[in-house]
Image: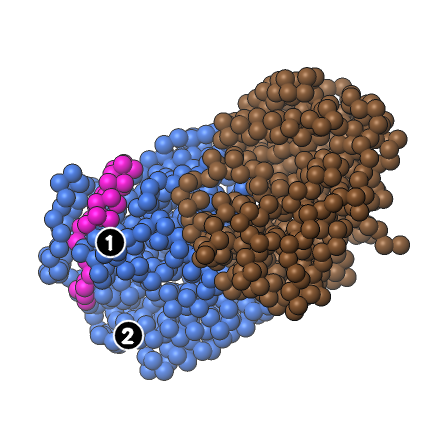
Chain colours: A brown, B blue
Amino acid sequence: MQRTRSWWGWGWDDQALSDAECTAYGRLLGSHADQPVPIPQVTDLQLRPSRIEVPKPLGHLSFSDPLSRASHTFGKAYRDVVRALNAQLDYPPDLVARPTTEADVINILDWATSANVAVVPYGGGSSVVGAVECPGDGFDAVVSLDLSAMDRVLEVDELSQAACIQAGALGPILEDQLRPHGYTLRHFPQSFEFSTLGGWLATRAGGHYATLHTHIDDFVESMRVVTPSGLSESWRLPGSGAGPSPDRLMLGSEGTLGVITEAWMRIQRRPEFRKSVSVRFAHGTSAMAAVREIAQSGLHPANCRLLDPGEAALAGSATNGEWVLVLGMESAHHPVEAGVGALIEIAQGCGGVLAGSQATEGRSTSSGERGDGVTSGETRDGAADAWRSTFLRMPYVRDAMARMSAITETFETATTWDRVEDLYKSVNTEIGSAVEQITGAPGLINCRFTHVYPDGAAPYFTVIAAGRLGSELAMWDEIKAASMEVLVRHRATVTHHHAVGRDHRPGYDRQRPELFAAALRAVKRELDPAGIMNPGVLVDQIPPKT
Amino acid sequence: MQRTRSWWGWGWDDQALSDAECTAYGRLLGSHADQPVPIPQVTDLQLRPSRIEVPKPLGHLSFSDPLSRASHTFGKAYRDVVRALNAQLDYPPDLVARPTTEADVINILDWATSANVAVVPYGGGSSVVGAVECPGDGFDAVVSLDLSAMDRVLEVDELSQAACIQAGALGPILEDQLRPHGYTLRHFPQSFEFSTLGGWLATRAGGHYATLHTHIDDFVESMRVVTPSGLSESWRLPGSGAGPSPDRLMLGSEGTLGVITEAWMRIQRRPEFRKSVSVRFAHGTSAMAAVREIAQSGLHPANCRLLDPGEAALAGSATNGEWVLVLGMESAHHPVEAGVGALIEIAQGCGGVLAGSQATEGRSTSSGERGDGVTSGETRDGAADAWRSTFLRMPYVRDAMARMSAITETFETATTWDRVEDLYKSVNTEIGSAVEQITGAPGLINCRFTHVYPDGAAPYFTVIAAGRLGSELAMWDEIKAASMEVLVRHRATVTHHHAVGRDHRPGYDRQRPELFAAALRAVKRELDPAGIMNPGVLVDQIPPKT
């Protein structure tokens, strides 16, 4: 049987928690609600009527049924789920267009430009920053451009270890096509199952590797982008110093300049050697020192995730106030025992205690790798195991909590080592009080470091608090504003890998150099003169030309 | 005694080859000339008179004496040296300005904008692509903005391993300031002594590392750039996904958007463990296979330079038609013996024969590190030793050959592995015939791979041919045009790390996506509305506004 995607929440319909599970989680985490909010039926949503006729030549690509429109109204942020549960779909796209070829994309953009229609590129729809919803003020209609039918690996160059992949391929779909060749892209964000290559590129997604190649950016060889002004294609180059990188201008452009249709990506042989360990620390300061030393050692572990006590407790890997550091190395070429030994030595030197360890040497038969550097199969230690399971389950639990009127959301950042510990403390203290003040009760604020660098780290915070039915969204928005304020004050990035979208604009506008914003606006005027591409994201909407 | 820089050729005056050495080299390499062209005296140059008065408030920063103007007329390409030897300085800058503060830079740009004066940012003046010479058509004058007085390391953040460095610092000057802290930037291009941080950033310079961090780009944390429209400063961030990277737009902008005044750079502890080996191969195909396998292994050697037989012979490291692969690893943290062992195993598996090996374990006291991944001191094997010596001497020999009317120049590129060997053969065959046809005699065409990637390599070609006094420049220009044609046909980048400047524009214009060119022009109009910044580089000169 074909599984169906949830129109209102994360992932698969059949993975959503039952009402009983929702209630149990709600009790566990102090929800004020007695029972979960019911999930509205799509047929009851009363969506604003579609304001546009399906253009004839694009008719076979276009859908305006309520399910298509409802499921493309939001991304999958907490605030999206709450609004969906409240049947509060104010700005559904008027049309969902599903191109099957690049020519379709060009035709759709041409039509949209001439018809004053805003276009929102849509990959897997997993945005947690409001990047795929569009009020479309000033436009006659909004089209959600769903790339998911363009999901083929078009070519594999085994000598260069690179593949040409269509932008609409979801993680598992592209990995399934690379696997028979013995290759993998090894980009496993938490959203892996429900996000696409094009979405990763447009948002500079963070993936599998905790060090070195933390973002998808580093795996790009060349890109094809359809803009309203035409097609842009860069050359396949392993490296170049010919002017500013054309690809780096498109990476992170979040659909505001054009639609990424395909890319040549660096792929890798599947790892045959893997080892993963976990180390416990009594104190945050020593745990952070260990992570810093590892990040500066040049050992380049694939996994280096630090969980603070709250996060470790939530993941079931420590419940006694300890910090847990999960370390892992992998290689398709050579054993990693010695490397992991060196990592352990650093961690122990900083006061860490080895807690679990598991190795795979030789060919692995597991095909179920996914998610944040932790693999399925029997190759993990207990802490990593618990962590992976929690990691993939987390968004479903978040939805269950949302149904119990609880506030459950994350925000993430990165900053240099001289500020990391201060920032961690500030967030705990200040957002801790904000949560108490705003919701009337203390909440949980957990943290993990998802990615680390020689010069800093990327802390990822989870906030869990009891909300009140009807006020939870306003409460979260206030907490979110407070968190952005803390980040900006510490000059920590407003997002390390979730992107800017519409939700991070206030912080982003203060973070980026004003002259870069001016440059970006100038580029947008050039590539998208009518301003139809994802208006309001990254830069203010360009008023449609008259 | 203060050493003086050569106004006409590479490096230090006292390192230039004597007339007798020039003659000997000329004979060795088949020059038609009997004796070297004399070096003109600056006082005999009859430079076009400076067309502009020194503006009063900037008077103390401005120089219009013949030596200052002559030495800032060209970079250090072969065609620059030949023209200098011919006293053919058609477009000397009218003024050399040497700001000592960022405020000076702002004042100079403000004045230049108002006075219709073109500004050419100038670091160490080592450009080999015509990036610092400027005809200045349509402008009332041209100023060479020499940043070399802004050469301080302003701050070192030891926890984050980062330093704030002024853009005008030459390689040795910034390393001298980092050394007392125990740190190094480890960016050692061939031009190390005569190029600056700002120049490296503006041109996306390639440096020390043959793999992984091949370009300076990867070491940038944040940048300050003075544009004619104002100051742009990015935040210090170890990583970020907040929109397209502001820094990546400035990296490679070659002085066309503004003047980089300082940057926070990732620095490293000085390596304590090093090992270097050389391996010989009978055949290019197997040597390239070894390099490819090493680049795809994830071992990340610091050095991985492949010399073809001609290059190896020139370096004195092989004279029997063998290819030589120089491999090196280094670490501040852990021994590298095992890693080098793994590299050797790959090379031997591809048919390579170990030729030399030398290790340093434990603290190194050498302070003379520089140049292309090979260190001074006693830590090298014979081939690496010969190579380094040739490498640093090469530009002086090039100048000697130029004085003997010989053509001696390089060009470099990068392409994916599926094309590398074809490209190598095409260059040898086609540029070989071009040289013979153009100069009337066969020349030498050598190649080394300077940087390698999982998906490709960066071949660096040297052309040596006997020219004819008076025609050598025209001959080289024809050879250069032919070489650019070969690169473009193979879709190999027109430059891997030498930059575009004015010389590579024809190839660059065909390489970059046309829409990216449009984007770049739009950015330039925004940041440099009067078009005064290095006009003609990267994009066509914007006509000065009237």
Coordinates of residue A242 in the picture (x, y in percent) = 43, 59
Q: Nearer the viewer, mark 1 or mark 2?
A: 1
Q: Amino acid at mark 2?
A: Ala
Q: Is residue B214 above or below residue B402?
A: above
Q: For the N terminus of chain A, give its image quadrant.
A: bottom right
What residue is drawn where x is 49% and y is 56%?
A: A530
Question: In front here: A213 or B399?
Answer: A213
Mark 2 residue element: helix
Q: Is residue A430 above or below residue A224?
A: above
Q: Is residue B324 left or right of residue B376?
A: right
Q: For the C terminus of chain A, give its image quadrant.
A: bottom left
Which numbered disc flags the more N-terminal residue, 1 or 2?
1
Q: Chain of mark 2?
A: B
Q: Tell me the magenta residue range.
A: B86-115
Q: Amino acid at mark 1?
A: Ala
What residue is drawn where x is 47% and y is 49%?
A: A542
Is residue A334 at all visible to an observer of this figure?
no
Q: Is residue A454 left or right of residue A145?
A: left
Q: Is residue A439 above or below residue B109?
A: above
Coordinates of residue A363 in the picture (x, y in percent) = 79, 52
Q: Which residue is mark 2?
A: B474
Q: What crowding class fits label 2: few (fewer than 14 Cα within 10 Å), some (14-19), or many (20 or more)?
A: some
Q: CA distance from mark 1 to mark 2?
A: 28 Å
Coordinates of residue B322 in the picture (x, y in percent) = 52, 67
Q: What crowding class fits label 1: few (fewer than 14 Cα within 10 Å), some (14-19), or many (20 or more)?
A: many
Q: Which residue is mark 1?
A: B118
